[in-house]
Structures are given as C-alpha cells and as structure tokens.
Image (cartoon, rainbow, N blue to C red):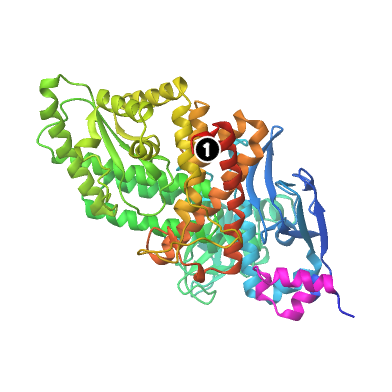
Amino acid sequence: MKNTIAERIQDFLKQFPPFNYLKKEELLSISAHIRVLYVEKGQYIFQQDNRCHDEFYIVREGAIGLYRNFESNQNLVDICDSGDLFGLRIMIIKKNYRMSAIADEESIVYAIPAKVFEPFIEENKEVNKFLLSSFAAHARNDYTETEKGHRIDNTISIEAAKDLSGLRTISYRKKPITCSPEDTIRDIAKKMTKKRVSCMIIVDDNNYPLGIITDEDLRVKVATGIFPITTLVSQIMITPVFTYSKKVTVAEAQIALIKNNLSHLCITKDGTRNSKLIGILSDHDLLVSFGNNPSVLIKETKRVKKLQKLRYIRKQVEKLLKSYLEQDIPTPHIINIISEINDALITRVIKLALKEMSSPPPVAFCFIVLGSQGRREQLLMTDQDNALIFEDVPEEDYESIQRYFLELSGIITKGLHTIGYEYCPAEMMASNPRWCMTVSKWESQFREWMTTPDEEGTLLSSIFFDFQYVYGEVTLADKLSDVVFDGVNKSNRFLGLLGVSALQKPSPLGFFKQFLVEQNGEHKDTFDIKTRAMMVLIDAARILSLYHNLKGVNNTLLRYAKLGEVEPENAALFESCAKAFRVLIKFRTRQGLLHHDSGRFIKLNTLSKNDKLKLKRCFRPIRDIQEVLKVRFQLKSLM
C-alpha cells in the first residue's frame, strides 16, 4: 500500500539540496520517517542552550526565525523559509543549540530523524559537503562570544567567521617545527617552549608528516601522569594527520576543522600524507584569515598611487562578493563589507585627484554619493551618482571657485570611471554644474523640490535624499539633512507625493499571479526586478523614515529595523519588508554576476521553479506596505 504522505513529502524535498542528490527510492525511505509539524506564530521549535533534538528540520511553508539570546534580548540571526534547513547541530557536533528557532508566522516544518539520514551522509559526498557548508553558514552569526554578545558594528572587523572569503587561498605558517618519532616527550616539550609553538609535527626521514602533538595532548596525556616525560612521541601522537595542499581555501579549511574536530591541518606539497610537509594551518590562522581579507583590501587601497591598481582591487571585490554569495553569508554583512571597501576606493580616488590639482581647495567642500551608493546598497558595478557641496563664498567669487571644484570633480568622476564605475547617463555627477554648488544653493534646491514639487523634482528628491557623506567637511552634508527633515516637519504633503510615486510603480504580478514583463524596447520580455519590486520597498522605507524623523539612517534594511522600533504594531510587516528586500537584493546581485550586468532585467525562462516561488513570496510585503502608505497619507485623493 502506498504511503501518500511520504510521497508528497518526497515531491517537496526533491526540489532542494541536499535531497536532490539522493535517489528516488532513498528519498522515499527517508520521507516515510519524517514528522510533519504545524507551528503557530511565536512557537518555539527549539531553544538556545537546550540539548539537541534527535532530528533536524526543513521549512515546508511559512518562516522560521533563528534568534540568539543575549541578556534576555532576542536578536535575529537569520530567517529560514521554504526549503531552508536548520537545527543541523545534531548532524555535526551534537552539542546544545546556540540559537533558538521560533515561528515568525504560521508554518509547516518537516522533522527529519538524524539516525535515518546519517547513512546517506556517509555514502554521498555531495550530501556531506552541503550539510557541512549549511552548518558553517548557520554557525556564523551577528555576534561573537569574545565580544560578550554585542553586535560588531565595525564593518571590517565583523565577526571573523563571517568572512569566509574565497578571494584568495588561506595563509599558513611555513617551516613548521618538526621532530622525529624517536624523540621523547621531554625533548619536544622543551623545543615547543623555546620556539613558542602550540604543536609539534612528527615526520619521517623524507619529511612526510606522520602525526601531531599539541599543547592539549601534553596536558591530557602527560601532565595527568598517564605517560611519563621519557615516553617516545610516537606513543602519544595523533595519527594520521589531515593534510591539504597550499591552495586550500578558507571555506575548505573551516569545513575540515569542523568535520574532524581538529585544531590543526598539515600543508604538504601535493596535499597528501605521502608528500613533504611545507606548512601548518591552525584554527587561529583560520580566524585571522576570516577577518583579514576586506581589511587587507582597504589597506591596499589606502596605499595605492595609480588608478589601475584600484581597478584591480575593485575586481577583487567582485570575487569577494561572489564568494560571499556562494557561502550564503547574511545579506546585511555582505552590504556592510562591500560598502566599506567601495567608500575606501572612492576616498582614494578623491585624494589622488586632489594631488593632480595645481592648488589646494580654496574653501571647504564635501563629496557625497547618492541613490544606491548613498544607501550603501550598491553591490554590483553600476553607474555613478554623486555630487559636491562647497562652502558659501561671496557672489563675486562663486564662478571661479565653482570652476575649481568642477575641474576637481571631473578628475574624480573620470577616475571612478577608470576603476569601473560607469558614467551616469543622466549626468547626475559632481562634474555637472547643476550638482556642484555651495551649501546655500543646495539648501535652496532641496526646499524647492519639497515646496513646489513636480515630476522631475519628486524623482530627483528620491535620489538625492538618500545621500551619504564620503569625503571632506561632514557638517556641510549635515546641513542638507537638516533642511530635508525641517521641510517634512512643516508639511506632510511632500511625503504624500512621494507616496503616490511609490504606488504608481508597475506591479510585479498580473491578475492571474503571472510575472509582468517589459512589453517593448531593449529589455522586452524580461522582468524588471528593480522597478517592479525593489524600488517600492526602498521608497516606502525612505518615506516612513522621513515621517518619523529618523536621521542618519539611509540603508533600507536599517530603516525597516528602526521603523519596527518606533511602530511596534507594524514591526512584523517591516520585518517582512526587510526580509523581502534581502532576498531581492541578493537575487539581483547573483543575476548580475552571472550575466555580467546590473542584474536588473531578468529572463524568467532562465529561472528554476523554486527561484520564481522565492521571488513571488517577496511581493506580498510590497502590496502590504503600499497599503500602509495609501492609508497613512490618504493617497487616494492625490492619485
């Protein structure tokens, strides 16, 4: 007799890794042992510090939040939706949970018994690899124990384990300290103390690694009296050693250490034990490598004297971005790290441009970036959007001083183009006299957009109001922020007009829930993910942040987080919007890297069924936030 429930579970699981690596009959046998759980919103599946269950989980429908609890505050680490695995500790290290799993909405979850699934991990290399990578991704979170549970805000020193970079192979220690199997424990202890090392590699006459002894081995096996110090090292060494070639990546090293519960890996000439030892890699080295790559790129950027070198660094950043996406690093951390490097690149271009000028700046100035750069959401190499503000000067000096800054801006924008930032087709750049003015003229421009808005003014304000200071006198930029919030406080009409613009964005789906595509032009039959999906979420976050006077918060994800604090009754909606935006920006970035473009226009026939479902799940929060804008600002009367 057929088990129809098991067959339905099988049909669902086969869409997702690692289950898609299994044969049909294998998957059916697993499905027959799976428990189906219905969890209500707010219900725990497991709690932090509790003993691991004898099963791990996959989301069938709904959303499960993973939270880390520090000092009674629940901090969101990740959200799992359909097809996402969680609770994998039972499969890897069988220790207490480090996070809590809570239903963010009504959900259906499949519980998969560990004992049933374990044989397939042993037999199937792809299953093994996927589970280890997934566990490593979930093990990385927004916090470090060394920081006593506080979020790391310094973008470059974000938790070391967050930076699983495939940008370059990992650095290891060359010329490791070695000994012979005939040496005694006393001999190697003296040697380790003298050389100040935490391990000793035992090698044969060919310098092939035979075993390893660590500080822990000396404590556990010798200091306890189990073995006397006259014992030969061959009797207490750990053997065989685990070896890799010098091309081992950060991700491979981490998985190897986790999987085998190791603290050291041996680096050999060809990666095998039957090869000469050339280095040693410790878990400490791995930790250092995790945190170093973005920092190294920024340090290199600050030293660069030629634009061509900056272009090379920017290409390296693209590789870094690609590796982050492949390893499923959380979106906020990707955005933070890439934005920091982008800021460093732009700053260096400005400094090099200043050196080309025949004289120093006549007055203080400030260089700002706009749009996606201003929101710190520009992951791909899109076109430039920037402007320059300079100090107020006497009217008779204005023309000559503006000419100086236009020349400087021209060198800057040309430099940015050289390193990979395309020129803005609409010339929305500081080299345009319209966007290179004194702070007073900028203030007048902002007020005009807000008091007498027209179609162009509404469009420009939506771009310019998301500006970010990069270089120069920051107080000049602060004055513009004050103008914006002062104007909003005096009248909500401007926000209403911005809201109308957000509501008039073309819908992502038609009446029958099909994707709406471009009907003509260069991008005919493609889906515009920016205009039909992302921009509504961006616009709504901006409008509501202005409404609540949330100063100094430009990033869309941070805006929704702040909005959740000031409007707790709508916190769930704002989190849904943030989640949708995280999915959309990551999806667009992947498409851009795949097709070597901006990722904006997507050919739907290249997407899997699962990708299309993920996209469609993002559209409900879009409709909901549009409804909030419509009611909040009474937009029916303005449309």
Q: Position of residue 399 (x, y in %)?
A: 12, 29
Q: Is residue 478 left or right of residue 499?
A: left
Q: Main secondary structure of the magenta part?
A: helix
Q: Residues within 10 Å of mark 1 (few under 14, many from 20)?
A: some
Q: Position of residue 304 (x, y in %)?
A: 25, 48
Quarter of the figure that contains the N terminus: bottom right
Q: In the figure, 178 relative to 475: above or below?
A: below
Residue 346 seen from this side? yes
Q: Is residue 532 left or right of residue 521?
A: right
Q: Is residue 564 magenta?
A: no
Q: Is residue 23 magenta?
A: yes
Quarter residue 518 falls in:
bottom left
The residue singled out by tag 1 in the image is 558
Q: In the figure, 91 relative to 75: above or below?
A: below
The foreground one among 239 and 306 is 306
Quarter residue 278 falls in:
bottom left
For numbered disc 1, what is the local secondary structure? helix
Residue appearing at x 73%, y 62% in the figure: 91
Residue type, label 1 = Leu
Q: Position of residue 589 (x, y in %)?
A: 45, 57
Residue 232 seen from this side? no
The foreground one among 8 and 453 is 453
Marks counted in the figure total 1
Magenta span = 4-28
The foreground one among 228 and 410 is 410
Q: Is residue 144 left or right of residue 351?
A: right
The foreground one among 18 and 81 is 81
Q: Position of residue 513 (x, y in %)?
A: 60, 60
